[in-house]
């Protein structure tokens, strides 16, 4: 019998020369190429890149959960000494149960909406331990809920997923993942939909939980700020390839790839407004997997690309500091001969300031939700209480202007937006668009008004059929 245990000096995860392909039509196309990664116990490893760079594809390949049109074409994935690349889903069952867990971007989709929280966690514990003792399992459920800092675990375990906030849902999914002390934990942008204060709490919690069980962790994100705060090492991906890999401090202080430099240049600086400096942008878009270029995959968007960058594919090279980079010109960047950031275009400058016509005007907007009364309260004739979700908001939005609306979860941002768009009726106040009062819900509004109001929701998957 093979010993799959991991000692502290050995990597929890070792990926060697991995290529992942998808079948489109009758042909197979390589979506991820020449991917390497080593994750050690008690290490949080970040993978960053734009949408479509291959981050989530790598995670699915490690989980052995690619779709029917996906396959591992080449390379090896080792969890400890256990080779995963050739395993079937049936062979992966014991690995999923105890050694390898994933926390998805949308926690609600990871839970069964018809089963109470406590029972869902209990199912994971039973599968891992084979323990059928209901009382003992229930105690473990309460323990893991306390571990993720959820107050009143007994009450929360009796709730359904929809009765919890987004931050609470994310903690429950973390509790399910950590309940079996896995060797490797993978988090696929788990804080994208959370407000900044809840995100900070979740990140602190992840760091604490990982160090407590000595697991290796992969954190997939597009947020470079999260990587700087949480991770020890980071891989930068673009169009299915590793562009750069280094310790976080080294990468942020001394990036060697034009793509990494471009990503860092796109990050807004706290305290710096559009009046101080415009954001720099990366023009163009990544290539489709059906049309990967012959040379450097980033050449079409690179502001410092030379002629041979378009014809010769650069190798992944190691620098003297253990920093790896895939670029023909990294030595010029390292020496300071080539300054890349200044070559990126600035974003749109602020338009000239002049009086603009008011587009939307909101006065004293109020939305109160009634709290259901119990049977006893109805018999006693107790007055119905209300929750003041939005209470007396006054806002004016001018044409060609962007108004930011910020606040923690539960502060009323979404309710305010839903009243404006007509998905929720107001309790009081007025909403005018181009001087015309728009009342009631969307069904009560004229079509010409509806065509002028559009909303982009937080979860795009829930917006599409």
Image (tube, rainbow, N blue to C red):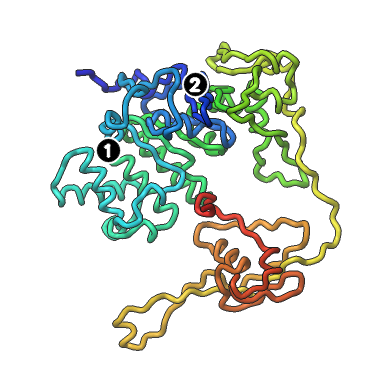
Front-most of 228 and 424?
A: 424
Residue in the image at 33% along x and 32% along y: 100
Viewer can see residue 304: yes
| Residue 78: percent from left, percent from top | 36, 21
The answer to whether residue 179 is above or below residue 413 is above
Q: Is residue 272 left or right of residue 58?
A: right
Front-most of 133 and 423?
A: 423
Front-most of 5 and 310?
A: 310
Label 2 SS? strand
Q: Is residue 120 left or right of residue 348?
A: left
Image quadrant occupied by the N terminus: top left
Viewer can see residue 335: no
Residues at marks 2 and 1, CA–CA distance in whole angstroms: 28 Å
Label 1 SS? loop
Question: Farthest residue in the top direction?
Answer: 320
Disc 2 designates what residue? 35
The answer to whether residue 160 is above or below residue 358 is above
Front-most of 25 and 62?
A: 25
Residue in the image at 59% along x and 72% along y: 443
Dividing the picture into quadrants, the one containing residue 317 is: top right
The answer to whether residue 309 is above or below residue 212 is above
For label 2, count other residues whose C-alpha is less than 10 Å away and answer few (under 14), some (14-19) or many (20+). Answer: some
Residue in the image at 78% along x and 67% along y: 358
| Residue 45: percent from left, percent from top | 46, 29
Dividing the picture into quadrants, the one containing residue 163 is: bottom left
Disc 1 designates what residue? 180
Q: Earlier in the sequence, mark 2 or mark 1?
A: 2
């Amino acid at each position: 019998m093979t010993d799959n245990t991991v000692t502290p000096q050995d990597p929890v995860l070792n990926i060697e020369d991995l290529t992942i392909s998808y079948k489109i039509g009758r042909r197979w196309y390589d979506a991820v190429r020449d991917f390497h990664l080593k994750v050690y116990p008690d290490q949080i490893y970040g993978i960053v890149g734009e949408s479509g760079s291959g981050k989530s594809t790598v995670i699915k390949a490690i989980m052995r959960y690619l779709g029917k049109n996906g396959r591992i074409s080449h390379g090896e994935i080792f969890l400890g000494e256990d080779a995963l690349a050739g395993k079937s889903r049936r062979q992966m069952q014991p690995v999923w149960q105890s050694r390898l867990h994933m926390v998805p971007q949308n926690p609600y989709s990871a839970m069964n909406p018809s089963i109470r929280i406590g029972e869902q966690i209990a199912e994971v514990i039973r599968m891992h331990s084979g323990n059928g003792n209901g009382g003992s399992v229930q105690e473990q459920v309460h323990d893991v809920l306390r571990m993720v800092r959820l107050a009143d675990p007994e009450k929360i375990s009796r709730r359904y997923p929809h009765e919890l906030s987004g931050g609470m849902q994310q903690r429950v999914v973390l509790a399910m993942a950590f309940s079996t002390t896995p060797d490797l934990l993978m988090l696929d942008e788990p804080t994208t939909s959370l407000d900044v204060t809840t995100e900070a709490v979740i990140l602190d919690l992840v760091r604490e939980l990982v160090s407590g069980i000595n697991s290796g962790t992969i954190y997939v994100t597009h947020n470079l700020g999260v990587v700087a705060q949480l991770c020890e090492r980071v891989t930068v991906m673009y169009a299915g390839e590793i562009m750069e890999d280094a310790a976080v401090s080294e990468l942020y202080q001394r990036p060697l790839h034009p793509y990494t430099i471009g990503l860092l240049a796109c990050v807004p600086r706290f305290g710096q407004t559009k009046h101080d400096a415009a954001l720099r942008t990366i023009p163009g878009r990544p290539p489709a997997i059906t049309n990967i270029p012959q040379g450097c995959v980033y050449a079409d968007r690179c502001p410092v690309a030379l002629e041979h960058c378009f014809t010769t594919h650069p190798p992944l090279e190691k620098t003297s500091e253990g920093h790896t980079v895939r670029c023909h010109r990294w030595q010029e960047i390292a020496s300071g001969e080539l300054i890349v950031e200044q070559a990126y275009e600035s974003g749109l400058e602020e338009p000239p300031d002049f009086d603009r016509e008011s587009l939307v005007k909101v006065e004293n907007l109020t939305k109160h939700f009634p709290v259901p009364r119990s049977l006893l309260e109805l018999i006693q004739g107790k007055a119905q209480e209300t929750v003041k979700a939005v209470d007396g908001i006054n806002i004016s939005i001018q044409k060609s202007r962007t108004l930011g609306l910020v606040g923690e979860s539960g502060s009323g941002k979404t309710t305010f937006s839903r009243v404006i768009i007509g998905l929720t009726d107001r309790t009081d106040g007025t909403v005018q668009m181009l001087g015309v009062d728009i009342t009631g819900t969307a069904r009560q509004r004229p079509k010409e008004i509806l065509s002028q109001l559009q909303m982009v929701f937080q979860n795009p998957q829930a917006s599409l059929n």
